[in-house]
Image: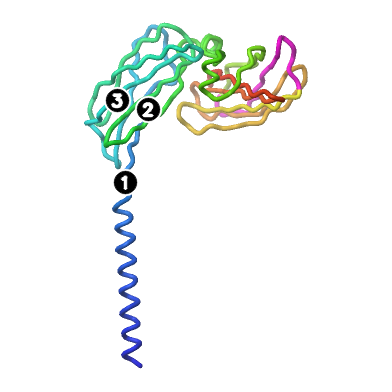
Amino acid sequence: MRRRLFLAMIAMLAGIVIAACSNNNEQAETPAMLEVKMDVPDHIDVDKPTKLACVVTYGGENVDDASEVKFEVWKHGDGDRQMLEAKHDGNGRYSVTKTFKEAGTYSVVAHVTARDMHNMPKQDVVVGNPEQAAAEGVISDGQANKEEGHHHDGGVSMSLSSHSFEAGKPVTLGVRITRDGKPMTDATVRFEIWQADNKHEFIDATEKGNGEYEAAAAFANKGTYSVKVHVEASGLHEHQVEQVTVN
Protein backbone atom coordinates (compact mmCIF):
# COMPACT_ATOMS: atom_id res chain seq x y z
CA MET A 1 0.00 0.00 0.00
CA ARG A 2 2.79 2.38 0.95
CA ARG A 3 4.66 1.44 -2.23
CA ARG A 4 1.62 2.31 -4.37
CA LEU A 5 1.20 5.64 -2.57
CA PHE A 6 4.91 6.42 -3.05
CA LEU A 7 4.74 5.62 -6.77
CA ALA A 8 1.61 7.78 -7.15
CA MET A 9 3.37 10.73 -5.52
CA ILE A 10 6.41 10.29 -7.79
CA ALA A 11 4.14 10.27 -10.87
CA MET A 12 2.35 13.42 -9.68
CA LEU A 13 5.64 15.29 -9.12
CA ALA A 14 6.90 14.21 -12.53
CA GLY A 15 3.72 15.56 -14.13
CA ILE A 16 4.15 18.92 -12.38
CA VAL A 17 7.78 19.18 -13.53
CA ILE A 18 6.87 18.32 -17.14
CA ALA A 19 4.04 20.87 -17.14
CA ALA A 20 6.35 23.56 -15.76
CA CYS A 21 8.97 22.81 -18.40
CA SER A 22 6.31 22.94 -21.10
CA ASN A 23 5.11 26.37 -19.90
CA ASN A 24 8.68 27.67 -19.79
CA ASN A 25 9.28 26.46 -23.32
CA GLU A 26 6.09 28.14 -24.52
CA GLN A 27 7.14 31.41 -22.89
CA ALA A 28 10.62 31.13 -24.37
CA GLU A 29 9.17 30.54 -27.82
CA THR A 30 6.89 33.61 -27.66
CA PRO A 31 8.34 35.95 -30.33
CA ALA A 32 9.36 39.48 -29.41
CA MET A 33 7.46 42.32 -31.06
CA LEU A 34 8.77 45.16 -33.21
CA GLU A 35 7.71 48.36 -31.48
CA VAL A 36 7.79 51.80 -33.08
CA LYS A 37 7.14 54.92 -30.99
CA MET A 38 6.45 58.11 -32.90
CA ASP A 39 8.28 61.28 -31.88
CA VAL A 40 6.47 63.90 -33.94
CA PRO A 41 5.18 67.29 -32.66
CA ASP A 42 1.41 67.78 -32.41
CA HIS A 43 1.78 71.27 -33.87
CA ILE A 44 4.29 72.43 -36.49
CA ASP A 45 4.96 75.96 -37.72
CA VAL A 46 4.74 76.75 -41.41
CA ASP A 47 8.15 77.17 -43.13
CA LYS A 48 10.06 75.93 -40.08
CA PRO A 49 12.37 72.88 -40.54
CA THR A 50 11.01 70.20 -38.19
CA LYS A 51 12.28 66.74 -37.27
CA LEU A 52 9.94 63.79 -37.74
CA ALA A 53 11.32 60.89 -35.72
CA CYS A 54 10.55 57.48 -34.28
CA VAL A 55 12.23 55.10 -31.83
CA VAL A 56 12.42 51.44 -32.85
CA THR A 57 12.76 48.60 -30.34
CA TYR A 58 12.56 44.83 -30.52
CA GLY A 59 11.99 42.85 -27.36
CA GLY A 60 12.62 46.00 -25.33
CA GLU A 61 16.04 46.65 -26.93
CA ASN A 62 16.91 49.44 -29.36
CA VAL A 63 17.11 48.50 -33.04
CA ASP A 64 20.07 50.24 -34.67
CA ASP A 65 20.14 48.18 -37.86
CA ALA A 66 16.61 48.48 -39.26
CA SER A 67 16.30 47.33 -42.87
CA GLU A 68 14.22 50.36 -43.80
CA VAL A 69 12.73 53.42 -42.11
CA LYS A 70 10.72 55.92 -44.15
CA PHE A 71 8.18 58.60 -43.30
CA GLU A 72 5.11 58.97 -45.51
CA VAL A 73 3.54 62.45 -45.31
CA TRP A 74 0.39 63.84 -46.89
CA LYS A 75 -2.01 66.71 -46.36
CA HIS A 76 -5.65 65.85 -45.71
CA GLY A 77 -7.71 66.52 -48.79
CA ASP A 78 -4.66 66.25 -51.06
CA GLY A 79 -3.89 63.12 -53.08
CA ASP A 80 -0.14 63.78 -53.26
CA ARG A 81 1.98 61.76 -50.82
CA GLN A 82 5.67 62.16 -50.06
CA MET A 83 7.94 59.31 -48.93
CA LEU A 84 11.02 60.48 -47.01
CA GLU A 85 14.05 58.29 -46.20
CA ALA A 86 15.03 58.51 -42.52
CA LYS A 87 18.56 58.43 -41.14
CA HIS A 88 19.72 56.64 -37.99
CA ASP A 89 20.49 58.99 -35.09
CA GLY A 90 21.58 56.28 -32.63
CA ASN A 91 19.87 54.49 -29.73
CA GLY A 92 17.12 53.14 -31.98
CA ARG A 93 16.08 56.60 -33.14
CA TYR A 94 15.48 57.43 -36.80
CA SER A 95 14.55 60.84 -38.17
CA VAL A 96 14.11 63.11 -41.16
CA THR A 97 13.82 66.90 -41.37
CA LYS A 98 10.88 68.37 -43.30
CA THR A 99 9.65 71.89 -43.90
CA PHE A 100 5.88 72.24 -44.33
CA LYS A 101 4.98 75.03 -46.75
CA GLU A 102 1.19 75.09 -46.26
CA ALA A 103 -1.07 75.18 -43.21
CA GLY A 104 -3.42 72.27 -42.72
CA THR A 105 -3.83 68.89 -41.10
CA TYR A 106 -1.30 66.27 -42.16
CA SER A 107 -0.85 62.56 -41.57
CA VAL A 108 2.60 61.12 -40.86
CA VAL A 109 3.18 57.36 -41.15
CA ALA A 110 6.48 55.72 -40.16
CA HIS A 111 7.19 52.68 -42.33
CA VAL A 112 9.65 50.51 -40.40
CA THR A 113 11.05 47.14 -41.47
CA ALA A 114 13.35 45.26 -39.07
CA ARG A 115 13.84 41.72 -37.76
CA ASP A 116 11.69 40.43 -40.67
CA MET A 117 8.76 42.45 -39.33
CA HIS A 118 6.97 45.61 -40.46
CA ASN A 119 5.29 48.27 -38.36
CA MET A 120 3.65 51.48 -39.59
CA PRO A 121 2.21 53.73 -36.84
CA LYS A 122 0.36 56.87 -37.89
CA GLN A 123 0.02 60.31 -36.31
CA ASP A 124 -1.91 63.40 -37.40
CA VAL A 125 -0.32 66.82 -36.96
CA VAL A 126 -1.47 70.41 -37.38
CA VAL A 127 0.64 72.79 -39.42
CA GLY A 128 0.16 76.51 -38.89
CA ASN A 129 -2.69 78.25 -37.09
CA PRO A 130 -5.24 75.71 -35.76
CA GLU A 131 -8.23 77.64 -37.17
CA GLN A 132 -6.55 77.92 -40.57
CA ALA A 133 -5.47 74.28 -40.41
CA ALA A 134 -9.01 73.20 -39.59
CA ALA A 135 -10.35 75.14 -42.55
CA GLU A 136 -7.74 73.86 -44.98
CA GLY A 137 -7.16 70.39 -43.56
CA VAL A 138 -10.67 68.97 -43.49
CA ILE A 139 -10.99 65.58 -45.17
CA SER A 140 -13.40 66.71 -47.84
CA ASP A 141 -12.44 65.22 -51.18
CA GLY A 142 -13.84 61.96 -52.47
CA GLN A 143 -10.48 60.18 -52.51
CA ALA A 144 -9.77 60.82 -48.84
CA ASN A 145 -13.15 59.51 -47.80
CA LYS A 146 -12.76 56.54 -50.09
CA GLU A 147 -9.57 55.64 -48.23
CA GLU A 148 -11.47 55.78 -44.97
CA GLY A 149 -14.15 53.48 -46.35
CA HIS A 150 -17.02 55.98 -46.13
CA HIS A 151 -19.26 57.60 -48.71
CA HIS A 152 -18.80 61.35 -48.98
CA ASP A 153 -21.79 63.55 -49.59
CA GLY A 154 -20.53 66.84 -51.00
CA GLY A 155 -23.64 68.64 -49.71
CA VAL A 156 -22.87 68.04 -46.02
CA SER A 157 -21.00 70.76 -44.13
CA MET A 158 -19.86 70.70 -40.49
CA SER A 159 -18.55 73.61 -38.45
CA LEU A 160 -17.36 73.49 -34.82
CA SER A 161 -18.61 76.33 -32.65
CA SER A 162 -15.16 76.77 -31.09
CA HIS A 163 -11.56 75.68 -31.74
CA SER A 164 -10.16 76.82 -28.39
CA PHE A 165 -10.77 75.36 -24.92
CA GLU A 166 -9.32 75.37 -21.42
CA ALA A 167 -7.60 72.31 -20.00
CA GLY A 168 -9.09 70.50 -17.02
CA LYS A 169 -12.51 72.17 -17.18
CA PRO A 170 -15.88 70.88 -18.46
CA VAL A 171 -16.63 72.28 -21.90
CA THR A 172 -19.41 72.07 -24.45
CA LEU A 173 -18.48 70.78 -27.87
CA GLY A 174 -20.84 72.17 -30.47
CA VAL A 175 -21.17 71.61 -34.19
CA ARG A 176 -23.51 73.02 -36.79
CA ILE A 177 -24.37 70.63 -39.60
CA THR A 178 -26.00 71.57 -42.88
CA ARG A 179 -26.95 69.59 -45.96
CA ASP A 180 -27.34 71.36 -49.26
CA GLY A 181 -27.26 74.64 -47.36
CA LYS A 182 -30.11 73.70 -44.98
CA PRO A 183 -29.85 72.70 -41.28
CA MET A 184 -29.55 68.93 -40.97
CA THR A 185 -31.89 67.46 -38.37
CA ASP A 186 -32.61 64.02 -36.91
CA ALA A 187 -29.02 62.85 -37.41
CA THR A 188 -26.94 60.68 -35.10
CA VAL A 189 -23.83 62.67 -34.20
CA ARG A 190 -20.75 61.55 -32.26
CA PHE A 191 -17.50 63.30 -31.42
CA GLU A 192 -14.27 61.28 -31.57
CA ILE A 193 -11.50 63.01 -29.60
CA TRP A 194 -7.82 62.20 -29.24
CA GLN A 195 -4.42 63.78 -28.70
CA ALA A 196 -1.41 62.46 -30.65
CA ASP A 197 -1.36 58.66 -30.36
CA ASN A 198 -3.35 58.52 -27.12
CA LYS A 199 -6.64 56.70 -26.63
CA HIS A 200 -9.61 57.85 -28.72
CA GLU A 201 -12.71 58.92 -26.78
CA PHE A 202 -16.22 58.79 -28.28
CA ILE A 203 -18.99 61.09 -27.03
CA ASP A 204 -22.60 61.08 -28.23
CA ALA A 205 -24.04 64.48 -29.09
CA THR A 206 -27.55 65.76 -28.43
CA GLU A 207 -29.54 67.65 -31.04
CA LYS A 208 -30.42 71.19 -29.99
CA GLY A 209 -32.38 72.18 -33.10
CA ASN A 210 -31.66 74.09 -36.31
CA GLY A 211 -28.79 71.74 -37.20
CA GLU A 212 -26.99 72.34 -33.90
CA TYR A 213 -25.59 69.38 -31.91
CA GLU A 214 -23.78 69.53 -28.56
CA ALA A 215 -21.97 67.25 -26.11
CA ALA A 216 -20.28 67.72 -22.74
CA ALA A 217 -16.53 67.00 -22.82
CA ALA A 218 -13.28 67.71 -21.00
CA PHE A 219 -9.69 68.05 -22.23
CA ALA A 220 -7.23 66.88 -19.58
CA ASN A 221 -4.01 68.18 -21.13
CA LYS A 222 -2.85 71.31 -22.88
CA GLY A 223 -1.93 71.07 -26.54
CA THR A 224 -3.58 70.26 -29.85
CA TYR A 225 -6.40 67.73 -30.06
CA SER A 226 -8.07 66.15 -33.06
CA VAL A 227 -11.87 66.17 -33.09
CA LYS A 228 -13.61 63.98 -35.66
CA VAL A 229 -17.33 64.64 -36.11
CA HIS A 230 -19.28 61.53 -37.16
CA VAL A 231 -22.70 62.11 -38.74
CA GLU A 232 -25.10 59.30 -39.59
CA ALA A 233 -28.53 59.49 -41.18
CA SER A 234 -30.56 57.40 -43.57
CA GLY A 235 -28.10 56.16 -46.20
CA LEU A 236 -25.42 58.57 -45.02
CA HIS A 237 -22.25 58.31 -42.93
CA GLU A 238 -20.05 61.40 -43.02
CA HIS A 239 -17.12 62.49 -40.92
CA GLN A 240 -14.86 65.49 -40.70
CA VAL A 241 -11.63 66.04 -38.74
CA GLU A 242 -10.82 69.38 -37.18
CA GLN A 243 -8.10 70.49 -34.78
CA VAL A 244 -8.65 72.38 -31.52
CA THR A 245 -6.23 74.11 -29.17
CA VAL A 246 -6.38 73.48 -25.43
CA ASN A 247 -4.68 76.09 -23.22
- Under mark 1, the amino acid is Pro
- Under mark 2, the amino acid is Met
Question: Could you classify mark 3 by the number of other residues whose Cα lies within 10 Å: few (under 14), some (14-19), or many (20 or more)?
Answer: many
> Is residue 37 one of those drawn in magenta?
no
Q: Relative to residue 11, is residue 213 depicted above or below?
A: above
Side of 237 relative to 207 (left or right) = left
Marks 2/1 in contact by CB < 8 Å: the verdict is: no
Residue 31 disc label: 1
In depth, the one of 183 and 49 nearer the eye is 183
Q: Give the residues in magenta.
A: 167-185
Residue 191 position in % (x across, y down): 61, 27
Residue at image mark 3:
69
Q: Can residue 2 be seen in this snapshot?
A: yes
Measure the C-alpha gap from mark 3 to mark 2: 12 Å
> Is residue 179 one of those drawn in magenta?
yes
Q: Residue furthest right?
A: 209
Residue 46 position in % (x across, y down): 42, 8
Residue 151 sits in quarter: top right
